[in-house]
Image (cartoon, grey):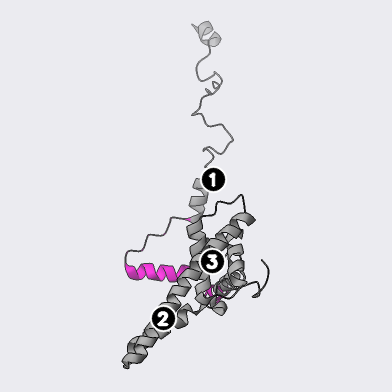
Amino acid sequence: MRFLRSGSKTSADEPDAAPATGPETVRVGGKGRPTPKRRDAEGRRRGPAPPPPRTQREAAKLARANRPAKEDRRAAAAERREGMARGDDRFLMPRDRGPVKAYVRDLVDSRPHLMGLFMPLAIIVVLSLLVPIREVQSYLSLFSLIALTSMIIEGILLGVSVTRKARAKFPNEKIGGLGTGWYAFTRATQLRRLRIPKPRVQRGATV
């Protein structure tokens, strides 16, 4: 019995069995936890997201807090106005962007147009309705009708001419006659000093 006890090894005398390897086994001496994803780590560093505003007053207060400073807004607005005035495509409206529209503006700005008197004509029409003298009303109404008819005819001729020149200048561009003609017409009806973008050619210049 003693021989058997001395020759046999108990479980306490046996060395520790090697740990089984597997996906859930934590390596001894390591971190003891899986490496977190970058998104989760950044979320923990930043903390929980603030709750959304519950009332209109809270929403307005949050909007004011996130709004840029007044000086920055004024500087951005001034830069936008200057960019639109000089014809920078970054600041222009979509209808004014592109080399085709710039060329159409140059064609319109290179010559005077009767349509440039459209705004003064509108004032005359209003005055003709306010003047109590019937004879004066008749003459002003007749003058306004003749001037308006002349402007319409000039606008149609201008649209046809500008479209033809633009298509010859940009043969690879798809230029619609109606849209280009209307763009030229509306540009010509504005007073020259009020046009945006500002004219970059003088009257009488060859375009």
Q: Residues within 10 Å of mark 1 (few under 14, many from 20)?
A: few
The part of the chain drawn in magenta is 47-75
First reached walking from the N terminus: tag 3 or tag 2: 2
Residue position marked by numbered label 2 in the rendering: 144
| Identity, as a three-letter code, of the amino acid under mark 2 | Ser
* Distance between mark 1 and mark 2 Cα atoms: 73 Å
Badge 2, how many Cα within 10 Å: few under 14, some, many 20+?
some
Q: Which residue is mark 3?
A: 158
Which label belongs to residue 38? 1
At label 1, the amino acid type is Arg
Q: Residue at x 56, y 39 (%)?
A: 31
Percent coordinates x, y for residue 184 in the rendering: 53, 66
Q: Which mark is residue 84?
A: none
Q: Tell me if residue 69 is in the magenta stretch.
A: yes
Residue 152 in sight: yes
Residue 128 picture location, percent across and down: 36, 87
